[in-house]
Image: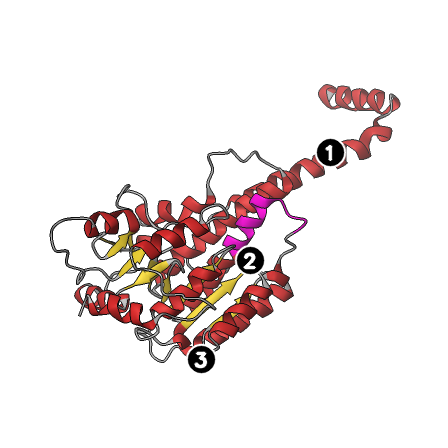
């Protein structure tokens, strides 16, 4: 009773000193703090296999639906994947070169290009009308976004696309447009998948660094395990975008969202099973040049494709010159295909 009386006495004295005047400020501060904490917890929550990816804007959903619908109509059987490539800046000559290169190897109807700009989409369609091309230009404001956020947003859209294709029971082969194909890699994939039906992902590394995955070249099957992994990949990208936009927590310079996928693969997230192809099947240019410069007669029968260097503003012309020097460039004057050179390359593996 005495304790209760003392508490009431203290409360009356505090209120006389202005508790009611500060009460809204205190309540407001507590509310803001609670909101920040809850929001951060939600953003850090991991995604399970049953979880859905977050809803995008109505415009982005519309484009995503169009792309997925087009892919669905193009895939003739469950075993045929969509050949998916993302066309970044300064890679149009490589797109044309690749289209010339694979003319007799695959059906263009299964090819899906995603470009950053409408003009690139129009140029590709003008070069080869049977491929499927979509542009992201209207999905993002390229001028107002910070460069790093912009790149991660585009990457997030790409990962969402792969997720949606897998959910529609479509296998996806992500490839790089600057690669050159000697054989259709699907013949190799089919052998591997026939030998081990439990494989979810087939990818490769680099000759100079065999521990680094090539994130621009992999086949991913539509399985519960791979869907779980891609959903987690998207969740991590969503989280880093949230933190960068709200500045709710610091992003270190060492945090590279482009390494999320290799980390998840090597951890076998979602119980996925993967296979790493040797460089002799998916050769890179340094390995291939070492092979061709050897005095021994080299055998190309094991090579399915050759990966060039990643193009950039400064290096594009140098890379094209290097590819011409080793007869891996099939684009002539006026953007016409040099079919004789294509046939010569493919005859080497027959």
Question: Which residue is disc 1 drawn over?
Answer: 29
Q: Earlier in the sequence, mark 2 or mark 3?
A: 2
Q: Nearer the viewer, residue 138 or 2?
A: 138
Q: Is residue 302 above or below residue 319?
A: below
Question: Which mark, residue 71?
Answer: none
Q: Is residue 106 above or below residue 308?
A: below
Highlighted magenta segment, given as a residue range: 143-156
Question: Which residue is disc 3 drawn over?
Answer: 73
SS category of the residue bearing label 1: helix
Q: Earlier in the sequence, mark 1 or mark 3?
A: 1
Q: Is residue 253 above or below residue 117?
A: above
Judge left or right: residue 162 versus residue 246: left
- Distance Cα–Cα, label 1 vs label 2: 29 Å
Q: Is residue 60 above or below residue 261?
A: below
Q: Nearer the viewer, mark 2 or mark 3?
A: 3
- Distance Cα–Cα, label 1 vs label 3: 54 Å
Q: Is residue 88 visible?
A: yes
CB contact under 8 Å: marks 1 and 2: no
């Amino acid at each position: 009773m005495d304790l209760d009386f003392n508490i009431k006495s203290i409360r009356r004295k505090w209120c006389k000193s202005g508790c009611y005047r500060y009460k809204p400020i205190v309540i407001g501060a507590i509310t803001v703090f609670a909101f920040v904490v809850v929001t951060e917890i939600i953003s850090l929550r991991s995604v399970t296999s049953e979880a859905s990816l977050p809803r995008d804007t109505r415009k982005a959903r519309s484009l995503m639906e169009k792309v997925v619908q087009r892919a669905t109509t193009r895939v003739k059987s469950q075993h045929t994947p969509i050949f998916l490539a993302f066309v970044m800046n300064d890679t149009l000559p490589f797109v044309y070169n690749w289209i010339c290169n694979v003319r007799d190897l695959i059906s263009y109807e299964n090819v899906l290009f995603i470009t950053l700009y409408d003009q690139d989409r129009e140029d590709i369609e003008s070069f080869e009308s049977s491929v499927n091309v979509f542009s992201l230009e209207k999905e993002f404001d390229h001028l107002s976004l910070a460069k790093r956020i912009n790149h991660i947003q585009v990457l997030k859209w790409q990962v969402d696309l792969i997720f949606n294709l897998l959910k529609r029971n479509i296998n996806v082969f992500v490839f790089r447009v600057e690669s050159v194909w000697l054989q259709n890699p699907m013949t190799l994939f089919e052998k591997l998948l026939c030998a081990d039906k439990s494989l979810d992902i087939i990818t490769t590394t680099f000759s100079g660094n065999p521990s680094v995955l090539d994130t621009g070249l992999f086949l991913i099957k539509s399985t519960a395990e791979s869907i779980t992994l891609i959903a987690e990949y998207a969740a991590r990208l969503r989280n880093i975008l949230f933190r960068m936009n709200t500045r709710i927590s610091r992003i270190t310079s060492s945090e590279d969202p482009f390494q999320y996928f290799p980390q998840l693969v090597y951890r076998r997230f979602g119980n996925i099973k993967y296979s790493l192809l040797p460089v002799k099947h998916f050769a890179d240019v340094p390995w291939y040049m070492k092979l061709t410069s050897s005095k021994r007669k080299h055998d190309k029968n094991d090579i399915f494709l050759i990966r060039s260097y990643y193009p950039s503003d400064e290096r594009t012309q140098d890379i094209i010159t290097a590819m011409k020097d080793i007869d891996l460039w099939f684009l002539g004057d006026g953007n016409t295909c040099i079919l004789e050179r294509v046939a010569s390359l493919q005859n080497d593996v027959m």
